Image (cartoon, rainbow, N blue to C red):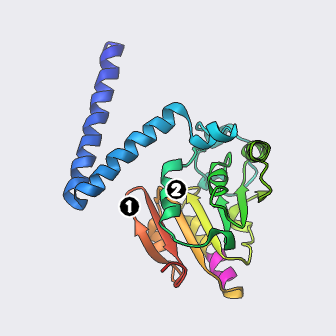
Amino acid sequence: MDAGLVSASGALGGNRQRASKLLATLRRDGLVESLVLVRGYIEYRLEKRFGARVDRKYGSETGGRISLDRLEIESANVGEGVQYEPVSELYLRRMLRAVPIPPDTYDFVDLGTGKGRPLLVAAEYPFRRLIGIEFSPELHEIAQQNVARFRARTGSTQEFELHLGDATSFDFPPAPLVLHLFNPFGEPVLRRVLSRLEASLGQAPRDVVVLYFYPLHRRVLDEAPFLRRVKATSQYAVYATPGAVG
């Protein structure tokens, strides 16, 4: 088949899929939610074409996709990992707006930091501390460089902690937490991380909010006895410990 026809056929198929999704949303959720979906798609395409606003603002570089087989990773859980792709800035801000908390009393923890985009976005709110955990040395180094660019551009003295390591061995800090996940790993690892978080809460009870973008394993959080679902859409789900969010 002619390459132009292949391209046109692919675009047409993509448009049909988007139209079908929009129609399903309209039937299920009504006009307002459908308009939100359209706006989100437009903003997402603009972000993909022109880059994330945080990168343009701070001189950071958080874009692109990187398969894990192109990275040197020493972890028994590498098979449960997911390729690097930056979270949508648009949807991260929506998740943050969904939880009316005083951010300066919370630590923001990003599991699977990658190049650090969530930390740069969260720095604008601002949280008490910004903590990232990444098991790829290459991505960890890029995240460090992006934080350095952020500091140089803004003069910020906010506290960043970037950890190179596995999420299953991370010790959660004893402060109230906002935990961000962009589907960084499979269900077995997610269960181990949540078990570790539950044990930490048993030792130091505190408020926790979980922001889960692309919630492929949302059922695991639904089943967690110490969390309740605050909000859920087709793109993300927000959870919190009882009393954390009114």
Binning the other alpha carbons within 10 Å of mark 1 as few (below 14), some (14 to 19) or many (20 upward) gives few
Residue ID for mark 2: 93
Look at discs 1 and 2 and give the one toward the viewer. 2
Name the kind of residue labelled 1 in the image. Thr
**205 lies left or right of 95:** right
Helix, strand or loop at label 2? It is: helix
Binning the other alpha carbons within 10 Å of mark 2 as few (below 14), some (14 to 19) or many (20 upward) gives some
Name the kind of residue labelled 2 in the image. Arg
| Part of the protein shown in magenta | 195-201
Observer-nearest of 13 and 107: 107
Residue ID for mark 1: 233
Residue at 58%, 57% (x, y): give it.
185
Residue at 34%, 52% (x, y): give it.
36
Observer-nearest of 147 and 180: 147
Q: Tell me where residue 162 sits by quadrant.
A: bottom right
Helix, strand or loop at label 1? It is: loop
Residue 189 visible, this angle: no
Q: Tell me where residue 198 sits by quadrant.
A: bottom right
Q: Of callouts 1 and 2, which one flags the residue occurring earlier in the amino acid sequence?
A: 2
- Residue 93 position, x and y percent, is 52, 56
Residue 220 visible, this angle: yes
**36 lies left or right of 125:** left
- Residue 226 position, x and y percent, is 54, 82
Residue at 51%, 69% (x, y): give it.
99
